[in-house]
Image (spheres, rainbow, N blue to C red):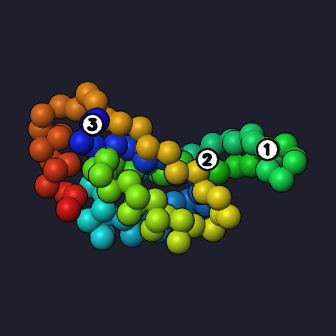
Amino acid sequence: MSEFSEIHVTCATRDEAARLGRLLVGKWLAACSQISGPITSVYRWKGEVREEEEWLLSVKTRTCLFDEVSALIESEHSYEVPQIVAVPLDGISAPYEEWLAGQIR
């Protein structure tokens, strides 16, 4: 298992993504957060196919903190069921990995 992961979270607005990113970095649960978008998401929700504009928040964290990061996102997110998906970071340059380690508790 990789020591670090990137968690992807879709958000309704750029402001929500920025607020969540600042919260996670401020609590030392993430080394950094990046916001991309707007993106277009197509999905099924409550029996209806929907297409919405969203913002993608990418959060770099320790894999072992997934449950804590996920719980904080769920408690602060505007969606009933937010997307919270972790992708292991297997190929990291040594200097960047050292920086990550110093930025996350």
Residue that numbered label 3 is attached to: 2
Secondary structure at numbered mark 3: loop
Picture residue at 50% right of the left edge, 45% below the top: 85
Residue that numbered label 1 is attached to: 44
Between the C-alphas of marks 1 and 3, the distance is 32 Å
Residue that numbered label 2 is attached to: 38
Badge 3, how many Cα within 10 Å: few under 14, some, many 20+? few
Q: Please report whichever mark, 2 or 3, sits nearer to the chain's N-terminal start.
A: 3
Secondary structure at numbered mark 1: strand
Is residue 4 left or right of 57 when viewed as pictured? left
Badge 2, how many Cα within 10 Å: few under 14, some, many 20+? some
Amino acid under disc 3:
Ser
Q: With respect to residue 3, does 75 lie above or below?
A: below
Hey, which residue is sitting farthest top in the picture?
Answer: 91
Instruction: Specify the quadrant of the image occupied by residue 67.
Output: bottom left
Picture residue at 63% right of the left edge, 68% below the top: 78
Amino acid under disc 1:
Arg
Picture residue at 58% right of the left edge, 51% below the top: 83
Camera-near label (2 vs 3) is: 3
Amino acid under disc 2:
Pro
Is residue 58 left or right of 55 when viewed as pictured? left
Q: x, y (%) of residue 18? A: 47, 63
